[in-house]
Structures are given as structure tokens and as C-alpha cells.
Amino acid sequence: MFELEPWHLLFLPLVFAVGWFARGFEARVRTADQGGTPLSVFRGVNLLLNEQPDKAIDSFIEVVKLDPETIELHYALGNLFRRRGEIDRAVRIHTHLLNRADLPVKERSNALAELGQDYLKGGLLDRAEEAFVRLLDDQAHRFAALRALLRIYQMEREWLKAIDCARRLEREAGEAHHVSIAHFYCELADKAIAKGELADAQQYLDEALVSDRRSMRATVLAGDLAAKRGQHDDAVKHWLRLEGLAPEYVTLVADRLSLAMDAAGRRTEALNLLRRSLLDSPSVDMLEVVYKRVADWEGAGPAEALLRDELKRHPSLLGFEKLLALRSAAVKGDPELDLLRNLIHSQTRKLARYRCSKCGFRAREFHWQCPGCTSWDSYPPRRIEELDAAG
């Protein structure tokens, strides 16, 4: 049993003093913590919760005036507004930061980068471009600014500027953009062909193939350019390269390829090529071209026989709809046949589309660049029905 000795009483004042000091220290810390948070922060949070964002912004701006250390709070709030699509409020916050005379150089660059993202998200491409061009001299933001400018120039279809940005990223950041650069040159070539500027188109296509020797699009356009010049044999030569690059892409040029071969006196060879392509890379689009050429060059009987044989090998609603169209033309006035054809047509409209392999965006026409996610070469040259059947 512990016994209290008289000398133990000497420690009682010391224990009391320690307790008193600890209590006072805790109170001082609590007071300091409360005093360190300006009332404007609590007022701003309360206004946000009460769905009064404009007044909340004024409150948070007041915080920065009183305490410059709360800059990160502004970044967080601006990003929140930008994600919610409230671009004007995000711009207001980041503009206020950028206009502060006492803002450090590093934070000024950060604010400008955030402001550029606000403009980009809001579709104000000219202002976004101006912001990111200013950031090119800042090494901490240079690569991000180049990527943003590359995106902007693609949206604005400023292909030469896009090529310049992509090449800078390849040289300085070690990124691979050769496929995109080839497409940028193809865009320029396509536009030049439409204007009849064939020499310029040839130069752009040469640059595209230097960037990406396996570019299907540049190969297709090279054939188009040769055909535009009346050089049918050269056009056929270019288009036939697709068989070695990616046979499924032959379907994109099958129609004009067969016509070019026919113009060069190679009709039999053209029919054999089409039939072989249909066997090697069967697709609804290829079937339509082969059926049309056989009907024009050999007659309706062989064309219908081809259609029936192909449907046995590769059944599809899209192909069956074509067979029904033939039967309807032969047997007119059959209401049940017409009803069946209409029902199938309502389904094939949904299936006769292309689908992006990256984002799933569906389109009636084939695109080299997805309108949804802007990815290049993301559309397989096959309809949805065929993709689902293969999957």
C-alpha cells in the first residue's frame, strides 16, 4: 500500500502549475485557430450552401484581400464552377487573381492557365488561344499550353498551326503525333482537291505519307487526286495499296475503284476484284457495291443470285432488306410484303451506322475523326450490325 510521505507535498504546487499552464495553452491555441480563419470564409461557404454563388464569390475575394495564403481556395472554387459549367463565375474568380498586383509570378502563371481552361471550356477559343500563347514562355506550363493549343487549332481547323504544335510536342516532350500530323495534311489536301489546287494537294499528301507511311486516308486521297487528273491507272494503283495496308478499308473506295478500272478497260478484272474483296472482307457496304456493279454489267439475275448466296454466308438485316426490295419490285401490290419491308427498314436505320471504338458515338457517315471525342482513326469501316455480330 502506497503511503504519503510529508515530502510528497512539495510536488503539489508544481503539479498545479503545470495543469494551469496546459489549460491556458489549449485556450490560446483554440483562440488562435478561430482567429486565423476570416469570417468571410464562413460567410462565403454559407452563401454557397444557400445557392448564392455571386455573393459567395465576393466573400471569397474579400478573403484573398485579407489573407493572400487562401489563393488555393480560389483555384478550388474556380474549378468547381468550371466543372458545373458556370464559366462566367470561374472566369471572374481567375481574372480577379490575375489582376492582383501583388500576385507572385508562379501564381500568376497558374491563374492564367486556369483562365485559359475556363475560356476553352466555354468555347471562347480566341481568348483561350491568347492565354495559352502567353504561357508558352513559361517552362512549367509550356507542354500543357501546347496541348491545349493543339486542341484549339483542331477545333478551329487551323491545320498548319496544329502541325506546328504537334511537331513541337514531338521534339520537346517526346510525344508521338505522327498519325495526327498525317491527318492534318490530309485535311489540307482534301480542301485543295475540292478547290482544284492539285499541285498543293500533291505536296500535302507527300508530307502526310512522310509522317505516316501507312496512312489509309492519305492513300485514299492519293487515288482521288490521280482520278481528278484523269490518271485512272495511277488511281487504281493507289487504291489497291489498301489491300496490303488494311483490306477492310477497300470498301471505302470500292465504288470509285471499280469505275476507274472500267474506264481503263479492266471491267472483268474489276468484277473479280470486287468478288474477292467480298469474300475476304465481307461487309454490307461491299455487298452493295458488288451487287450494283453485277446488276449494271451482268444483269438483274446474276445480281440477285449473288445477293442470295451472300446472305446465306453472312446473314444480315441490311442485306435482307435489299433482297426484299427486289422482291417488292417483282411482286407489286403485296401489302404483307410491303409491311415486312417497312418493319425491317425501321430496324436497319438503327443498324446502318458507324460507331466510334473510343467513345461509342454513332454516325450515318464514315468519319476519319470522331465528331464526339475527336479521336482519329477510331471508326471501323463497318456498320454497327456487323460489329455486334463479330463481337
Image: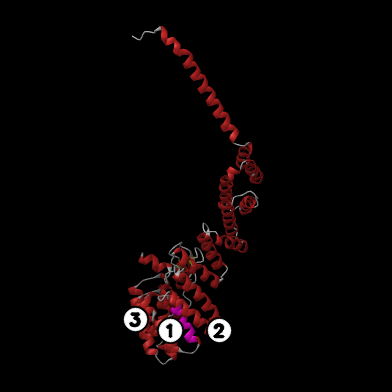
- Give the Cα distance between marks 2 and 1: 22 Å
Magenta residues span 218-227
Vertical placement of residue 268 versus 42, above or below: below
Q: Position of residue 292 (x, y in %)?
A: 43, 82
The residue to which callout 2 is attached is 197
Q: In front: 154, or 369?
A: 154
Whether residue 374 is visible here, answered yes or no, is yes
- The 10 Å Cα crowd at callout 1, few under 14, some 14 to 19, many 20 or more, is many
Q: In front: 378, or 389?
A: 378
Q: Which residue: 35% across, 72% down?
A: 314
Q: Position of residue 140 (x, y in %)?
A: 51, 56
Numbered tag placed on residue 334 in the rendering: none
Which residue type carries mark 1?
A: Leu
Whether residue 375 is visible here, answered yes or no, is no
Which residue type carries mark 2?
A: Glu
Q: Earlier in the sequence, mark 3 or mark 1?
A: 1
Q: In front: 13, or 62?
A: 13
Which quarter of the rendered picture does the N terminus lie within? top left
Vertical placement of residue 176 versus 105, above or below: below
